[in-house]
Image (tube, helix red, strand yellow):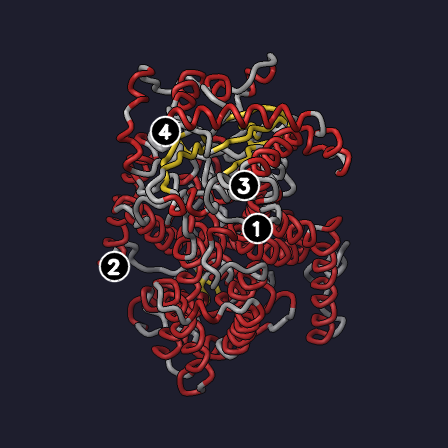
Amino acid sequence: MEPNSHSQPIRARFWTRGTAILGALTGVGALLYLYRLVYGLGATTHLDNQYPWGIWIAVDVASGVALAAGGFTTAALADIFHREKYHDIVRPALLTAMLGYTFVVVGLLADLGRYYNVWHPLLPSMWQGSSVLFEVGICVMIYITVLYVEFLPVALERFQGRVRFPKPLRFLDKFVESALEVADANLRRFISLFIIAGVVLSCLHQSSLGTLMVIAKAKMHPIWATPLAPLLFLLSAIAVGFPMVIVESIASARSFRLAPEKTLLSSIARYTPILLAVYLAVRIVDLTLRGAWQFVMEGSVQSWMFAIEILGGVILPLVLLSLTRVRNSISGLFSSALMVVLGVVLNRINVFLIAYRPLYPEKIYFPSWMEIGVTLGLFSGMILVYRWFAMTFPVISVHSEGMMDEGRAGKDIESRQPLPIS
Amino acid sequence: MGLSRRGFIQTVGIATSAIATNKSALAEQRPASDADQQYAVLVDTVVCIGCRKCEWACNDQNKLSARSLATYEDKSVFNQQRRPDHDAYTVVNEFSNPAVGTKRFTVKVQCMHCLQPACASACIVGALTKDARGPVVYDPWKCIGCRYCMIACPFQIPAYEYQDAASPEVKKCTFCLDRLNVGQKPACVGICPNEALTFGTRREMIDLARARTRHHPDRYVDHIYGEHEAGGTTWLYLTPTGVTEAGLPSLDEKPVPAVSESIQHGIFKSFVPPLALYALLGLVMRTTRRERHGDSNNASGETNDGAE
């Protein structure tokens, strides 16, 4: 990661009406999460022997991982392909990925019957090379570590030159300061190794998430039952990376009363129609080769869900983001990027829930209110933690001319004081 | 009906002993394989009288909430289709045979103990394994409770203890491994009052099934369910109807884990593809940096990127 001179901790009030609502949702979600731990999956979810996976896997885990793809796509663009101008959005994307994956793990733990055994795949005696899930698990574990390492320089930047211990411990200042310096210098030397590793690990597990349902082919609706699923998952993850950055960047700018990085975002949005077109082309080829178009036309729930997914989540934003007029307007950018994001979420829901047709269903799975509550709580909680990080570490880049509200927020940032460690 | 059925059962027995003499000839035609020697059970749904004693014996053996044997004589359970669950590893369902008017037949379901089990291929920690003798075995201490085995199973067999918050387990037929270890038949086979359930090696069971269909082509569909389905199973079925009419999933002959395992092993072939991608990205990183910065920029790890 290159030094990012624009990035600063944002000074703002943490609690607003919006964050209060998110806080309430997080609180309810946490209580429901606790309820799940105490009373079990049966008391909390609508899962049964016919539907072993629900929204905690389809949304919290599978969609969560896909939406964290902004981390590796922007890292690849700015740090590997050296499109330097995009550096300003690398850090927010990295933070989204780091927190996204962290919350994916928290969500996954709720779903695991024996969550306390989650570390078992690390034991060589339990390695299971033929299991797709094993690969996903190992890759995600390593990738989370890589993400935290990639974030370290940001954390160091926050404290370097500003180490101020309380009075009795003042003598530690110099020592800690020089330790940070050494750490920073070493990180700078080796960080590119981690950045490349992050991209490789992402390609591996983003695709393998798609391989997960290949083994259940006999129970999968033919629209989504394809051996090309890993490629489709990888392509859609790459395609959703930049739209996710756009959505998140505009949303956080609005929330912090900063001007959105319009030039940068509309510039990065140019890639999206190309990436979506590649994804769409592979899907069309896949459906054609497998002779699956008849199932698209059969008028079932599955074919309607497919239509919404492709028309609303791929084709429409593809067309919209091809138009300069749309790319040059914040609302145009936001809404078309949001379509891509929701399209990918819908795709994951379709693959893991809608396409999955158990052999002997007693009743169709629909999530319980508690499952929905936990999912909402996780997403709300993540946004709040993101806000805290953005207010504590130099993540979001601020251009002084870009301040919307000079009087308030701008002055706070300019008068940034050394922040004490305590 | 009971009488005629008993008569029929006797003929089946005679037929079985009759083919015993030329069984060796049959066996010679095919190369003996590992699968041939695995333990197997033949479920003859034509011979089955639906007494559900196998359900009782299973519950008793596995210490499930077993009730008195008399309660299993209640035929009203056949009014609906039941599935195995955490408290019943095997259940018997009743079906009608459209070819013979209203005639009913009964089908026992349990884990099929596949030759190439999808559950074991899917399991993230190897909690489900294929015993070389045939059974698919579950180790709750390894299990993390992800329930991917339930997604993978093409027969929808593994059940989960959803009501257990502390240490839920995947539950399914164990093939009575404890009994096999001491030279006994599985409990359900042991209690079966006629030859609806027969225990032996897989080769023997296939030969037996073939003999029965040959001697009574009028009673059986000429197809041994499980001989090839899903790459082959060790529990084999004879049915009077097509498989779907008997409530059994219609599956092709490909082992269920074949595609996902070849994708997986392709991506990780000696770790070459991931390492190649790593090297390629390292190269891109190096060249694009040169283009953008010339050689002056060596601040951040110039010597280390692209390392392999």
Instruction: State yes or no: discs 4 and 3 in contact (Cβ < 8 Å).
Output: no
> A77 or B147: which is nearer to us?
B147
Residue bearing mark 1: B252
Q: Residue at x 43, y 22 (%)?
A: B54
As drawn, the label of residue B217 is 3
Residue bearing mark 4: B1
> A304 or A359: which is nearer to us?
A359
> B135 or A196: which is nearer to us?
B135
Q: Of label 3 and label 1, which has the lower sequence position?
A: 3
> B263 or A135: which is nearer to us?
B263
| Foreground tag (4 vs 2) | 4
Q: On what subunit does the disc labeled 4 rest?
A: B
| Foreground tag (2 vs 3) | 3
Residues at marks 1 and 2, CA–CA distance in whole angstroms: 54 Å
Q: Of label 4 and label 1, which has the lower sequence position?
A: 4
Q: On what subunit does the disc labeled 2 rest?
A: A
Q: Amino acid at mark 3?
A: Pro
Q: Position of residue A365 (x, y in %)?
A: 32, 48
Helix, strand or loop for disc 1: loop
